[in-house]
Image (cartoon, coloured by chain):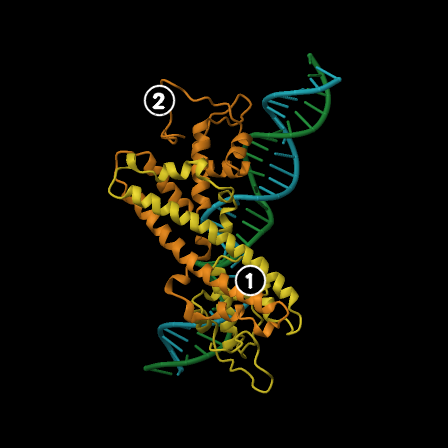
Chain colours: A yellow, B orange, C green, D cyan
Amino acid sequence: MSGEKVLEEPAAKERPIRDLTIGRVADAADCKVQTIRYYEQIGLLPTPPRTAGNQRRYSQSDVDRLLFIRHARGLGFPIDAVRDLLSLSNMPDHSCIAADTIARAQLENVEHRISRLTSLKSELERMIEQCSGGQISDCRVIEALSEHSNCTELDHVDPTAV
Amino acid sequence: MSGEKVLEEPAAKERPIRDLTIGRVADAADCKVQTIRYYEQIGLLPTPPRTAGNQRRYSQSDVDRLLFIRHARGLGFPIDAVRDLLSLSNMPDHSCIAADTIARAQLENVEHRISRLTSLKSELERMIEQCSGGQISDCRVIEALSEHSNCTELDHVDPTAV
DNA sequence: CCTTGAAGCTACAGTTACTGTAGACATTAG
DNA sequence: CTAATGTCTACAGTAACTGTAGCTTCAAGG
C-alpha cells in the first residue's frame, strides 16, 4: 500500500499487467471464485477483459478493489453501503460533499454497531463468568438472554444487520 | 422474571393460560407473525394448540421462549447455537460446559469485530475531518479498507455469521 | 343477529449474499 | 500429446427470514 491510491486505475501511460486468473484473485482476497463472478454480475467489480479462450484476466487494481469489498463486507456493511463507499473513490477531487455525507452515514452506522457489540460483549462475559464450573441450574445464560428488562431499545433490531 | 425459570413449562398443577394470539405474541417479542410460524416450522418453537377455527393460541412461556430466541439472534447467535442453548435449558442438571463454549466462541467473534469497527470508525472520522472543505484525494478510507496488512486471520470470516 | 374489517390460515415466491453443482471448454506441466 | 487442473455458463440451494395471494375466522358495532 504505502501511500498509493490503490483503487484508481493506473494512468494510460502505464497499462496494468492483466495476467491474474480468477482463481489467483480469489486466493489473494481469500474468497471464492464464484463470489468474484457474483460481484461482477451485480456491478461491484468491473467486467474484466477475456483471453481468446474466454477466461477472465485481472490486474492488481482488481485485487485491491476486491480486498476493499471483502473487508467492508467482513465488517458487516451491506452491499449497497459498499457500493456507496466504492463510489467515493471514483469521485472527482473537487466534489467532496457527497463523499462527506456517505462517510457520515457510515460513521453513524459503525458507531451503532460498536455500541451494540459492546453491550453484547459484557453480557457474554457475564455469562461465561457465571457459567464456569457450575451446573445449568446455576447457569444464567438462558435467563440472561430471556430477560427483557436487560434490553435496551437497541437490542431489538434486525438481527441480520449486526 | 425475578428468579423464575422462565423457559420451563409450568407444572401440571397449574396449567398456563393460553389466550395469546400469534399477533399479540409477535408484538410482545417485536417480531413478525411470519417469523413465529417460521420458528415453529423449524422446531425452535413448539407447535401450539389451535382454536376450533384453527388459530394458534400461545401462553406466556411461549413469549418468554420467543424473547430468548430473538434476543440471542439479535446478539448474533446463529439459529443452531440458539437451538443448542434452548436444548441445554431442558436438561438443567447437566454440565454447563457446552453453553460456556458457545458463549466463549461468540465473545471472541464479538471482540474482534469491535476492534475492526473501532479502527474503521477512526478512519471515517479522519476522512470526514479532512473532507470538509478538502479533497477526496486526501481521504484514506478506501485505502484503509483495502489494506490487507491490517487483517488478521479472523478478518476473513463469514460476513453473515455476525 | 348480522355485517364488516382486522387478523389469522396455508402455501409459496422473493430477498440477500453468497455457495455448490453439472457438464463443457481452456490452459499448463510433464 | 495427454492428463490434471482450472475456468466457463447456467442454474439450484442455503440461511433466516419477509412478502404476497387468496382464503377463513374472530370480535366489535349497528
Q: Where does label 2 land, which residue?
A: B11
* Amino acid type at image mark 1: Val
Mark number for residue A82? 1
Which of these two is toward me, A105 or A61? A105
* Amino acid type at image mark 2: Ala
- Residue B76 position in % (x across, y down): 43, 48
Res B76 visible:
no
For residue A121, side relative to residue A16 (left or right): left
B109 to A14, vertically: above or below: above
Q: In the rendered view of the protein, which quadrant contains the N terminus of chain B?
A: top left
Indicate the secondary structure of the residue bearing disc 1: helix
Q: Residue at x 46, y 57 (%)?
A: B159
- Residue A10 position in % (x across, y down): 56, 81
Mark number for residue B114? none
Q: Are marks 2 and 1 on the same chain?
A: no
Indicate the secondary structure of the residue bearing disc 2: loop
Q: Residue at x 38, y 41 (%)?
A: B83
- Residue C27 position in % (x across, y down): 46, 79
